[in-house]
Image: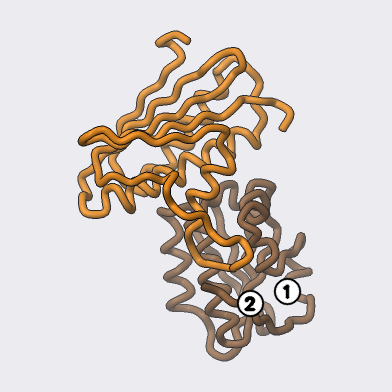
C-alpha cells in the first residue's frame, strides 16, 4: 500500500452530498488497476451510503454543522477496498444494533443489516471525540 | 431525482428518474401524502430509470404501499434494474411487493387485496 492509493474526502454531514461519496468510490475503483465488476462497486456504494446516512441521522442528530471524513484505501494481495468513516458526533456503534426481522415487512431498520451483508469486514472504534467505522470489501470481477 | 405522473384508467403510474436515496426519498413521501387518490389507490411505481436506491428510498416505497393497502388498494413495482433487485432481495421486500418486469403487466394484471402486516 502506498499513499498514492489512498483518497481522503472531508464532507458536510448532509444527506445532500452522499452522491459525492458514491461517485468517488466508483471513480477510485475505476482506476485501481484491477477489474472490478459493477455489482461489487454498487454494493460498496450502497453500504457506504447507508453508513453515512446513519452518521447524519444519529451521530449528528443534534449537530447540523458536523462533518464526515471518508478515507478510501486500496489494499493489495488480495485486492480490497478499505473505507474508513470518521465523525465527531454522538457515539454510535452500528455493530451493536439489533438486526431486522426479515420475516416482517417493516418500513425502516435495514441499513445496518445491509452494511453487514454487503461488506466483508465491518468494525467500529470509538475514541473520545471520534467515531470510526471501518469497512473492507474484496474486489472481484466475477461475483 | 424527479417524478413523473400519469393515469391509465384507475391506475396511477409514477416514474422515478435518477438516484433514489435518503436525500430524495422525502420527495416521494410528499407525493404520497399530497397526491394519493381517494378511494382504493392503485399505484404502479416504475423504477426503470433508477440506477441507485438505498434503504431510505425503499422505506418510502414501503410507506406508500402501506398507505395504499390500508385503503384496500396496492402499490406495485416494475421495470427495476439489477441493483434495485439486489436490495429488494436482500431485505426480502421482493416478497412484500408485487413485482413486474413490464409496466403494462403491472397496470393490467388484476388487482387483488393484500393483508401484509407492515410495522
Q: Of the numbered discs in the image, which one, if any, rests on residue B107?
A: 1
Q: Is residue B15 left or right of residue A126?
A: right
Shade representing chain B:
brown
As displayed, is residue B99 above or below residue B53? below
Give the residue drawn at x 43%, y 52%. Answer: A97
What's the residue at 55%, 66% (across, down)?
B61
Marking on residue B80: none
Q: Nearer the viewer, residue A79 or A12?
A: A79
Near mark 2 (Cα within 10 A), the count class, few <14, some 14-19 or many ≥20, is some
Question: Could you tell me which secondary element the residue under label 1 belongs to?
Answer: helix
Residue B111 shown left or right of residue B24 in the figure: right
- The spot of residue B11 in percent (x, y) is 66, 79
Evaluate whether label 1 is on the same chain as label 2: yes
**Mark 2: which secondary structure?**
loop
| Residue found 51% across the figure and 41% down from its top | A47
Depth check, mark 1 against mark 2: the one in front is: 2
What whole-number distance in Å separates the C-alpha atoms at marks 1 and 2? 20 Å
Q: Looking at the image, is B84 positioned above or below residue A32?
A: below
Q: Which residue is mark 2?
A: B116
Q: Earlier in the sequence, mark 1 or mark 2?
A: 1
Of residue B82 and residue B66, the one placed in the foreground of this image is B66
Color scheme of the displayed model = by chain
Instruction: Tell me the subunit letter for badge 1.
Output: B
On screen, A12 above or below A7? below
Residue B73 location (% of width, % of height): 63, 83
Amino acid at each position: 500500500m502506498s499513499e498514492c492509493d489512498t483518497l481522503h474526502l472531508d464532507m458536510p454531514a448532509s444527506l445532500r452530498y452522499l452522491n459525492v461519496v458514491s461517485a468517488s468510490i466508483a471513480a477510485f475503483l475505476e482506476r485501481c488497476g484491477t477489474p472490478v465488476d459493477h455489482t461489487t462497486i454498487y454494493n460498496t456504494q450502497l453500504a457506504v451510503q447507508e453508513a453515512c446516512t446513519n452518521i447524519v441521522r444519529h451521530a449528528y442528530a443534534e449537530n447540523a454543522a458536523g462533518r464526515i471524513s471518508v478515507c478510501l484505501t486500496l489494499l493489495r494481495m488480495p485486492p480490497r477496498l478499505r473505507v474508513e468513516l470518521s465523525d465527531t458526533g454522538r457515539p454510535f456503534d452500528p455493530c451493536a444494533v439489533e438486526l431486522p426481522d426479515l420475516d416482517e415487512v417493516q418500513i425502516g431498520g435495514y441499513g445496518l443489516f445491509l452494511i453487514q451483508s454487503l461488506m466483508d469486514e465491518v468494525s467500529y472504534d470509538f475514541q473520545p471525540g471520534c467515531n470510526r467505522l471501518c469497512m473492507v470489501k474484496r474486489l472481484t470481477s466475477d461475483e | 431525482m424527479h417524478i413523473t405522473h400519469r393515469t391509465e384508467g384507475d391506475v396511477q403510474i409514477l416514474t422515478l428518474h435518477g438516484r433514489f436515496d435518503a436525500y430524495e426519498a422525502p420527495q416521494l413521501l410528499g407525493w404520497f401524502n399530497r397526491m394519493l387518490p381517494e378511494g382504493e389507490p392503485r399505484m404502479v411505481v416504475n423504477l426503470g430509470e433508477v440506477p441507485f436506491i438505498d434503504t431510505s428510498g425503499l422505506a418510502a416505497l414501503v410507506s406508500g404501499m402501506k398507505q395504499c393497502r390500508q385503503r384496500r388498494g396496492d402499490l406495485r413495482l416494475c421495470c427495476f434494474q439489477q441493483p434495485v433487485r439486489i436490495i429488494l432481495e436482500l431485505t426480502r421486500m421482493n416478497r412484500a411487493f408485487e413485482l413486474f418486469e413490464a409496466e403494462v403487466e403491472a397496470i393490467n394484471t388484476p388487482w387483488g387485496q393484500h393483508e401484509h402486516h407492515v410495522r
